[in-house]
Amino acid sequence: MNLVTIAWKSIRQRALASFLTALSVALGVTLMVSVLVVHGIVDRIFSQNASGYHLVVGAKGSPLQLVLNTIYHLSSPVENIPYVYYKELKANPRVLNAIPICMGDVTMEGNFRIIGTSPEFFEVDYHPDKKFRVRGHFLEDDFDAVIGAQVARTNGWNIGSTFKPAHGVADDDHVHDEVFTVVGVLAATGTPNDNGVYIHIDGFYQIAGHAKPIDEAVAKALAFEAVDTQKKKGEAPDKPAPAPAPPKEKHDDHAGHDHHGHHHHELPDEQKEVTAVLINAKHDTAAILLRANINEGPYAQAAIPFQEINWILNNVVGNVRTLLVIMTALILVVSGVGIFVSIYNSMADRRREIAVMRALGAQRGTVFAIIFLESILLCVGGGLFGVLLGHGMVVIAAPILEARSGLLIDPWAFETLELILLPALIAMASLVGIVPGMTAYRTDVAKALHA
C-alpha cells in the first residue's frame, strides 16, 4: 500500500470534515475562475471589436457612449447627424471607407437591434483579416435584410423570413407597416454583429417616420451650410440654401422582386440623418488629422474605439477584476487556514494511530509524508472541483449575460492564468501541511500508546 492510498483512507475516515474543508477551497477557486474567465471574455470581445475601425463619428456628446452604442449595440444614441455630413466624410480624401449607421428600431421577436447601413458594411473586415461570411447574399434591394447568427438561432429565422420593425421597443403600438425579407444569414463571428439585424439604408429611409420633417430639414440644412461656409471661407453665407425638393417617385429596377406593395420614393438628402459613421482612414496619420478636424467642428465628434474601450477596461472593468481577484485570494487563504485547523485538530485523535504505525516500523519521514499528502489531496482535489464548478457557472451564466448585455459569451473559454492555480494550491497545501506533519513526526510512541 503506497503513501497516497494511506492518506486517502485517512481522509475518508474523516469524510464530513474533509469534504467541508475541500469545499471551502473549491468555492474560492470557483469564484476566481469565474472572475478570470468572464473578464477575459469581455476583454477579448471589446478589444477585438474596437480594432475594426479607425474612428466612429457621431453627434456631440459622450465618445464612450457613441462607441458602445455603434459598435457594441449597448446604450442608446446621443443624437443624429445630417446625411449630407456623412457624404462630406465619404468624399474626404483622407477616408478609405465611410459606412453609415442608422438605428432606432428593433425586432418584435427577441428585441434585436435593427441597423440601417450600406452594402459596403459587409465588404470591410469586421476584425483585421476576418471577413463576413453569409449564407444567401448581402444587401441588394431596399427591403432586404441580413441577420446575425444569434438572431437566426433565437428567432428561428431563415432566408425568406419576413418581419416588421418596431420603433424603439417591441410593442404592437409601435410596429411599422413596412415588411423586410431576410436574404442572408451571417456566419457566427463571436462579436455583437451576431445580434444585429441589418437592413438596406435606402429601405430604412422608406420606413414611416424615419424622414426628418421638411421644415426641420430646411432649418438644419441652412445651419449646416452656414457653418460649412464660415469654416471654408471665413465668412457667413449671404443667401439661404434652397429648400429641399419634394420627394420623387422611385421606380424599382429589380423586376419580379416583391416588396409587399411598398411605395418607393427617393428622399432628398436634407431629410435624411444617420446615427453614426464608421470610418477607416487611408493610414493612421490621416485618421488622427481627420479626428482633429471633426472634433473642431460644431456638428460631430470622432471617437477612437480602441482608446475608449481601453479606458473602460483599465478604469472600470480592470479595477473590479482586481478587487474580485484579491477577495478570492483571501477566500483561498481562509480555506488554507481551514485545512490547517482541520488536520491539526485531528492530530490529537490520531496520536495513537500514528504511534501504532511507528511501532509497526513506519519511519518518522513516512508519517510526515502521509499528513503532508492529506493536505495536498484536500487542496488539489478541492481546487480541481472548483475549476469545473467555475466553468459550469460560466456555462449557466452565459445566456443570462448575453440577454442582458448583448455580448456573446463563450462558456468554454479558458484563461491561461488558470494554469497557475494548481501550482499555487500545491504551494499553499505545502505550507498548511508542514506544522501538522511535524507534529506527527515528533509523536512520542511510548507516551501515545500508553495514553
Image: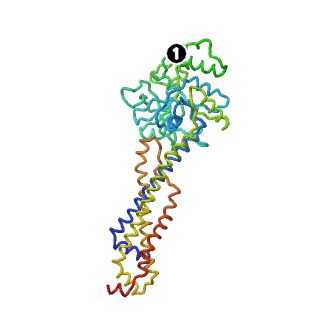
Outermost residue on the top side: it is 239
Looking at the picture, tell me which residue is in the foreground, 92 or 223.
Answer: 223
Q: Amino acid at mark 1?
A: Pro
**Residue 390 picture location, percent across and down:** 43, 56
Q: How many marks?
A: 1
Decide if residue 309 is in sight here. Answer: yes
- Report x, y in % for residue 382: 41, 64
Element class at badge 1? loop
Name the spot of residue 174 as percent of width and height, x first. Answer: 39, 26
In the picture, the quarter occupied by the N terminus is bottom left
For label 1, the crowd category at 10 Å Cα-Cα, with few meaning under 14, some 14 to 19 and many 20 or more, is few
Q: Nearer the viewer, residue 235 or 71?
A: 235
Vertical relation: 36 (above or below) 248: below
Asked which quadrant contains residue 12, the reply is bottom left
- The answer to whether residue 119 is seen in the rendering is no
Q: Is residue 429 above or below residue 127?
A: below
Which residue is depicted at the point 60% across and 18% down? Answer: 226
Q: In the rendered view, how is the structure colored?
A: rainbow
**Height in image: 418 above or below 62?**
below
Q: Is residue 12 left or right of residue 205?
A: left
Residue 4 locus on image (x, y percent): 44, 75
Give whichever of 146, 97 is nearer the camera: 97
**Which residue is under mark 1?**
247
Task: Tell me the residue at 36%/26% (across/down).
Answer: 173
Quadrant housing the C terminus: bottom left
Q: Nearer the viewer, residue 201 or 14?
A: 14
